[in-house]
Amino acid sequence: MATAVASAAQWQEQVADKRKRLLASIPSEWIISPVPDDQPNVLDVPKTCGLLTDRELEITNTADVSLILRKLATAEWSAVEVTTAFSKRAVVAHQVVNCLTEVFVDRALQRAVELDAHLKEHGTVVGPLHGLPISLKDQFPVKGLETTMGYAAWIGKVAEDDAVLVKLLERAGAVLYVRTNVPQTLMWAETYNNVFGRTLNPYNRKLTPGGSSGGESSLISMHGSPLGVGTDIGGSIRVPSHFCGLYGFKPSSHRMPAYGIVNSLDGQESVPSAIGPLTVSLSGVTAFVRGVLDQEPWRYSPGTVPKPWSQDDYLLKNHDGGKKLCFGIMWDEGSVKPHPPVLRALSRTKQALEAAGHKVIEWKSLRHSEYIAVARAAWLADGSEDYNACLTTGEPLIHSMDPNADPHDIPDFRIPRKPLTAYQTWQLHKERRELRKAHLDRWEATISESGTGRPIDAIICPPAPYTAVPHGQTRSSIYTVIWNALDSPSLIIPVTKVDAQVDVMPAREEFWSAEDKLIHGMYDVKLYEGLPVGVQIIGPTLQEEVVLGVGEVIEAALKNH
Amino acid sequence: MATAVASAAQWQEQVADKRKRLLASIPSEWIISPVPDDQPNVLDVPKTCGLLTDRELEITNTADVSLILRKLATAEWSAVEVTTAFSKRAVVAHQVVNCLTEVFVDRALQRAVELDAHLKEHGTVVGPLHGLPISLKDQFPVKGLETTMGYAAWIGKVAEDDAVLVKLLERAGAVLYVRTNVPQTLMWAETYNNVFGRTLNPYNRKLTPGGSSGGESSLISMHGSPLGVGTDIGGSIRVPSHFCGLYGFKPSSHRMPAYGIVNSLDGQESVPSAIGPLTVSLSGVTAFVRGVLDQEPWRYSPGTVPKPWSQDDYLLKNHDGGKKLCFGIMWDEGSVKPHPPVLRALSRTKQALEAAGHKVIEWKSLRHSEYIAVARAAWLADGSEDYNACLTTGEPLIHSMDPNADPHDIPDFRIPRKPLTAYQTWQLHKERRELRKAHLDRWEATISESGTGRPIDAIICPPAPYTAVPHGQTRSSIYTVIWNALDSPSLIIPVTKVDAQVDVMPAREEFWSAEDKLIHGMYDVKLYEGLPVGVQIIGPTLQEEVVLGVGEVIEAALKNH
């Protein structure tokens, strides 16, 4: 008992020390005047705090990554000034939404100086991401820096090498400058842990920015970063993107280089996580995916598919050049009806596409609850042994994201399951295979109603049944997990904002499930007013370029509508 | 006890019935005069038996698949006559080496008639494999036929649908006509089971044709098939190809469509099996891989990588067009020294390549025993539960391929291991990842000595430490398992034949291991005289086209040397 207390005290001391060191890593002249705790929306703080110059505001407000890259490549903006501007804004954001875990601006500025010198001397960029500041979820080790991933026991764990992706991003010219917060275990759609505490949604700090890449979504929606790298095993890129009005992309699991990252459930391959970007523009998603693939990541990261960027696929060469596409629209997955603004975002997308000459057909939910069951069984196959192995210093396992929850209460869904045997996981893989086959066959069968001579070109569906919700209130990420179980590339595009005038919840007397009723009851249009709403676009496994090309078509249709 | 006896009798009755039905499926006019049991070499029997016409001998002797395809496409040979010729020769082969499990010539001829009619009517082939007879290992279900896979309990298991690959091969124009024998459980480098008995090597029937695709290698080396489809989890395509003088190719696991096949250890994905061809010519390997990829298998088989055939890769566009390549040669893996003819095949390949202007550098064995350990742990993770689930009718598990073994003796390596938990397999995946990373890094590092500005273009190594050996004498397939653990595409090219005059075993006093000593002691040049010897060519994961392109370079160098 004495040991346990001593140990508890010890991990808390380590946390206090880590927080002190995080604070010390922020240049003191970038500390802003306190913002009142009860101010919900803090999106304007970077402008009103007075720290950023007009030029720095102009740079960081640029909501088009390709434009930032162009200005950097032409030396209209130097890498040093772009890095400085985003670093300052990231630090400002952190002070109001608590999004950062590591700040390494000195290292970033040193790299920026080199990039500027290279451009000046050679007249050419170092690579396709020359000078672009990129933030990293706290899973991507950078040599010489700690990687904590929200575990107290990992404080002081200094990386001996960069993750492969870190090396390749730097080779492509990116400037890495901050890492961002995650939930403990990563397996939550919110962002809270015992080391760094809770990350807040800048649209309304009473709400969650989503998770597990919630440090990223919070930071980027405040324009503290133009583009960040997250991971997604069940929605961890897409839910935060949707909650914070960003573009987010979950590629197939084996397209991006994963070697050298730290992860939850490490070694679990039945329904693995995927690495992808969250960013302010669709051009950012494409710049990232293409920029990484151009580095031939399969030469350095085992398990990464050697499939170079295909410009033909991106230009939809086998999809009529994007002129007339056919989409399957899935309004719901059959057990939970999405809230009015989420359905309105879908309607709006459908109308925009039809107005642009495309066809939209119904895509009925197909055995989706089985996908969720398979994914959960895969993630919990270890009986939580992986989590426990990361809690070696007395830090408690977090059982709820609710700030008011009794930390000793363990909800049913967090009670560890009986571990599976290897043979049982083999049977699970057979189940998953049958589900994936059913999906492929359904997809192919749409050829009879697409009117294009091809099967549908993509599916459009909700990213979640709701927009951002209060801390602790997210539910199972059913609308995103489906596509992890299928390993389908999935893109989030922001479409609209909640509007109390139109997003009226119709009265309902019958519900599809208890979960449906619960989520229906969560709707509070006053609380949600002004929150961003996205749609999710899904394509075939490992055809990332097609999904991005289709994304461009949708984006253009929405803009013209 | 009474039940066990009754049950034992029952499975044996089912086997007797299955064998009777197999015999009945052979046209009686194709039964040849008996060949004396003590005649070791039966390669000439198709010619001497008198059943095949001169034209049928000419067709089946053609050792170039592209030439067969050309003659079919130009209607110089009809699909019906080619199908008839190979069907007759397959049945002849079966009578002396016991290679077939299903014979469905009527179905094949019906398809051949359709193909001939199509070509006549339209003037075009049905697909890239128009009219080519293709044999199938007993793992590829064909609708309406039994799939036994060497298990008595599976007798009578009639397929309700074709495997995806079966559908796609037929769509590409292939004619399917026979299926071939395997060892019980598939996890042996020989071919023997309780249902169909033992398959023999036509070069010397006292020897094994290898396994598990040993029905294929035996059949094809007698030209009873120009091309067969096998699977390979540890060498099951490559060992039989090497033992029987064939071209054999194990692609990466996820390149070919696996949906709908039956398999051993089904659902095991840590070190999975791969589907590939065994054939009489390198052109056959390429025709198969390209022919299947042209059908876009990823649209029908979940888990198949959507990577179309790359002609640029095949033409070695990023490898100097094949003009000056650099090879890493691995003479041995460090624990077992190969027999003299195997080393001579490597020397000869090296000399031929150097004479053609290529460079050959040493590739030292890299942690190879760890690959073997990881692969074994993956395959045995179920504590043999998968095998036992397939032995439901009293049929015994086979513990040795040795005809003289006491069937009750269980050798150490066949005693079931303690099953792994899911969490333990996650740790195994982490080990495997580190091994794969070490391999990638070693490969990249060769850039400093290749002299080409690139890393090596391929590795050349032995397919096994020996040529074909007596039944029951194969050892662990260490030289092939390495590349399954790495998921590297691996090609077998036949290079030479054992020559008692030159392949003299040097005296050795020191041995690298007990296994090394044992395998050294197995060398018997009189017994092995005239047996085929191959080399193994290895490339990077999922770059099948590069390996085939490099194979062409090696083949040309060997021919010109």
Image (spheres, coloured by chain):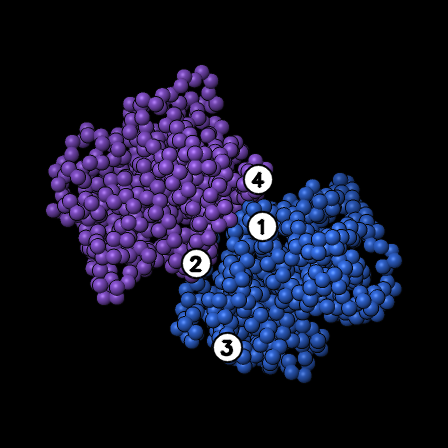
Chain colours: A blue, B purple
What separation in Å lies between label 3 and label 4 (alpha carbons)? 50 Å
Along the viewing direction, whichever of A445 and A282 lies nearer the viewer: A282
> Which residue is disc 4 drawn over?
B447
User: In the rendered structure, the residue with mark 1 lies on which chain?
Assistant: A
User: In the rendered structure, the residue with mark 3 lies on which chain?
Assistant: A
Name the residue type under label 4: Ile
* Residue A358: image tag: 3
Q: Secondary structure at mark 2?
A: helix
Name the residue type under label 1: Pro
* Residue A16: x %, y % from top left: 81, 49
Q: Secondary structure at mark 4?
A: helix
Q: Secondary structure at mark 1?
A: helix
Front position among marks 3 and 4: 4
Q: Is residue B82 above or below residue A511?
A: above
> Which residue is disc 2 drawn over?
B298
Q: Is residue B229 above or below residue B326?
A: below
Residue B154 in sight: no
At horizontal 43% and vertical 39% (from top left) the residue drawn is: B537
Along the viewing direction, whichever of A328 and A376 lies nearer the viewer: A328
What separation in Å lies between label 1 and label 3 (alpha carbons)? 36 Å
Residue B84 in sight: yes
Task: Please check whether the numbered discs 1 and 4 fall on a single chain.
Answer: no
